[in-house]
Amino acid sequence: MHHKVSIAGVDEVGMGCLAGPVVAAAVMFQENIPEDISELLDDSKKIRPALRQEIYAVLNQMPHVKIGVAAASVDEIFQLNIRKSASLAMQRAVSKLNILPDLVLVDGTIAPDFGCATQTIIKGDGFSYSIAAASIIAKVLRDKLMVGLARKWDRYGWEHNVGYPTVMHREALRKYGCSPHHRQGYITVRQFSFSMDVEQKEQVKGQGFYE
């Protein structure tokens, strides 16, 4: 009997942001993907937000799709650097599949050690359905997290820029300084004063999303 090769696609979202965690998703299609889904799958940045939400919901309901999601926190980004943090988030996402794939396809150029064969693909979300699905899931979840954080930290426009360095975000940083969710190691962020009391630190730790 031939062993069917199990392939997982992995992608991360948020490497270019000034605030918030980097989030990764791993997706494994255990059976053929229905055509109406496969034709929707693409780079998450090219898909309008409402459709991303729909695809995300459908993927989560499909019985033969395994999904793992994880993050690396702002603290980890500070301690490790963003590339290592992205690798860590991707490793965590694959481990949450609870099954080691034969092959992991990774979008971009970072090839973390997953304990199995790994292949990086530049612009992989345009070539691989599983990478495209992973990019959509990671994007929807990270955007949702940043919109949630924006309710308390409403000065930075995260509900619109989700932490990316837009003009408005940089202006707010200049005006108000940093929040506990900003990446302190980044030069753009380091230029601004950083103060955080113990209570705020505890609130950040209590996010749970980072575990």
Image (cartoon, rainbow, N blue to C red):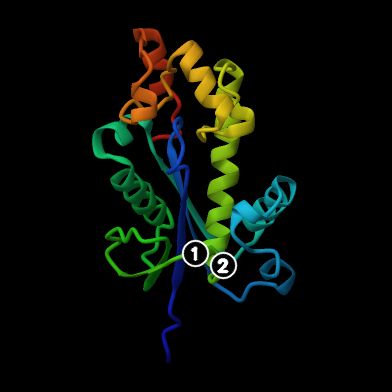
Q: Quadrant of the N terminus?
A: bottom left
Q: Secondary structure at mark 2?
A: helix
In the picture, the disc for residue 23 is: none
- What percent of the width, then of the height, locates residue 8? 45, 66
Q: Is residue 133 left or right of residue 84?
A: right
| Residue positioned 39% across, 63% down in the render | 99
Please tell me which residue is depicted at 37% across the width and 47% down the height of the picture.
Answer: 89
x and y percentages locating residue 158 in the rendered image: 58, 28
Q: Which residue is mark 2?
A: 126
Q: Is residue 66 above or below residue 140?
A: below
Instruction: Looking at this view, name the residue that lies furthest to the bottom.
Output: 1
Q: Is residue 67 left or right of residue 147?
A: left
Where residue 201 sits: x, y (%)?
A: 37, 15
- How far across and how far down the image is residue 193, in percent? 36, 13
**Looking at the image, which is closer to me, 36 or 174?**
174
Image quadrant in which you'd find residue 146 = top right
| Mark 2 residue type | Gly
Nearer the observer, 108 or 142: 108
Query: How many C-alpha atoms fall within 10 Å of the one at disc 2: few (<14), some, or many (≥20)?
Result: some
Q: Do tag 2 and tag 1 residues touch (Cβ < 8 Å)?
A: yes
What secondary structure is found at the residue carrying circle 1?
loop
Q: Which quadrant of the view contains residue 73?
A: top left
Question: Label 1 belongs to which residue?
Answer: 123
**Residue at x-position 49% and y-position 11%:** 176
Q: Residues within 10 Å of mark 1 (few under 14, many from 20)?
A: some
Number of numbered discs present?
Answer: 2
Q: Give the answer, above or below, for where 113 lies relative to 80.
A: below
Image position of 99 with respect to 195: above or below = below
As shown in the figure, which amino acid type bears the numbered disc 1? Answer: Lys
* Viewport quadrant of the C terminus: top left
Query: How far is disc 2 from disc 1 in space, using C-alphas?
Result: 6 Å
